[in-house]
Image: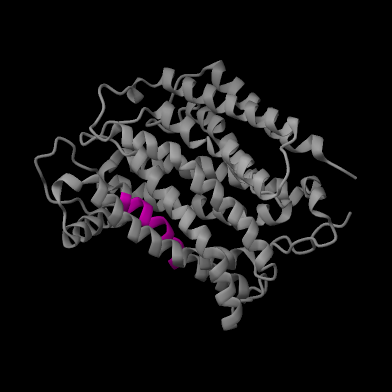
Amino acid sequence: MENSKSPLLGRPNNNVPNEHHHALWTRWTVSLAVILIVGTVSASLMRQHVSNEVPAYFFAISVFHPFAGLLFYPLIVLFLHQSKLVKMELTTRENLATTLWAMTPVALSFACNNILTMYGMSGQTNGKPDVSTVLALILQKLVVPVSLAIESVYEHRYPLFVEGAGVALVMMGVVVAALTSHENNEKDDVIGHGMHYHAKLLCLLLASVPLATGFLLVKRATRIVPHVSDIELWAVLCVPETIFSIALSYLAQYIHSYDQNLHMTEMTAELYTGLKCIVLGVSPPSSNDSFIPSCQSAAKFNWLSLIPGFAFNITIPVLVRQLEDSTVIPLLRAVALPLASLVAMTKIDPVIATPFSWGGVFAMFFAFVGLLMCYLPQKRS
């Protein structure tokens, strides 16, 4: 069996039938999986700082990330092209139009997930969590079974029993890790709920659908434009995703404050204030609210999160293309949660530090075994 000769470019291996792609766990794909897991853990911990410091600016956070990609990914593509590591394929209008058409539904899916997740995780007006951390973590990882179901329908096949068992073990690891983290961290306790609690709960529940759909659409896009490199796909993705994120930020503000009858100018000013806070560290004018956002701290962690965030994001289309599998992404991201609980036990970060617990160790064991069950038994000659 011959492996792809250009893994950095994300070229598909056309010599391998689709049903054999689960066997393509080479050193390269394993390395990418490690980068995705470690990058997810690092970025998530840093973004948790941002959410804790500025819970009211959830819509600004959802806009900043694709906008940052819009600024930096083209520079990365240009650097790789100048280094002769990537051949630019988006030099013609036809290629650019086809790629944009393939990535636009991906952008819409990711933008919907971002705004739903950021709103669902946003705190109350006093900065305390509304939906408990343990429940929010579990609801976000429902993307794993949802992704398996959506991909199975798309591929017109039934999931293997061992796949279902593996996903169940991964979810067990997620639940154990979340419960362990909750028991060891009393700061996660929620006393009372805000008036939008049920709406936030519903958003976290629904967020898995556009995210799983987005991963599947990435798989579809790699088939539509197989000659376009993965880094170029992500550079193009950020254009429509930024537009969708800005539009959804206005919609989210309108729904969130429908009783206040906000005008467009007021929502624009609020978005601008939020972006200044998380990008430049500029605090808003003082108000009568009991919670004053710490914009300097939020901006620091927001910028730091871009490094692991870009790293693991670039691995997504490469892994999907190499393995011909979109469920692998939420599975690997789910494994990152038990790993994050182990990192918290090292007390390397005082904000998320928790005492040692065997529950976190067992959670990592369940998640890792579940991941192996989903792929190793399917290896074929």
> Residue at left 16%, top 58%?
263
Percent of width and height locating residue 12:
75, 62
Above or below — where is 14 with respect to 328? below
In the rendered structure, does residue 230 fall within the stretch colored magenta? no
Residue 53 relative to residue 244: left or right: left
**What is the chief secondary structure element of the magenta stretch?**
helix
* Residue beneath the point at 23% across and 33% down: 195
Q: Is residue 62 magenta?
A: yes
Residue 65, picture quadrant: bottom left
From the viewer's perspective, is residue 361 above or below residue 161? above
Task: Using residue 275 as the reference point, say whether residue 214 is left or right of it.
Answer: right
Q: Quadrant of the C terminus?
A: top right
Which range of residues does the magenta coloring cover? 59-71
The structure's colour scheme is one colour
Q: Is residue 312 something one can see in this rendering?
A: no
Q: Nearer the viewer, residue 73 or 150?
A: 150
Relative depth, front residue between 288 and 153: 153
- Identified at 36% across, 27% down, the residue is 132
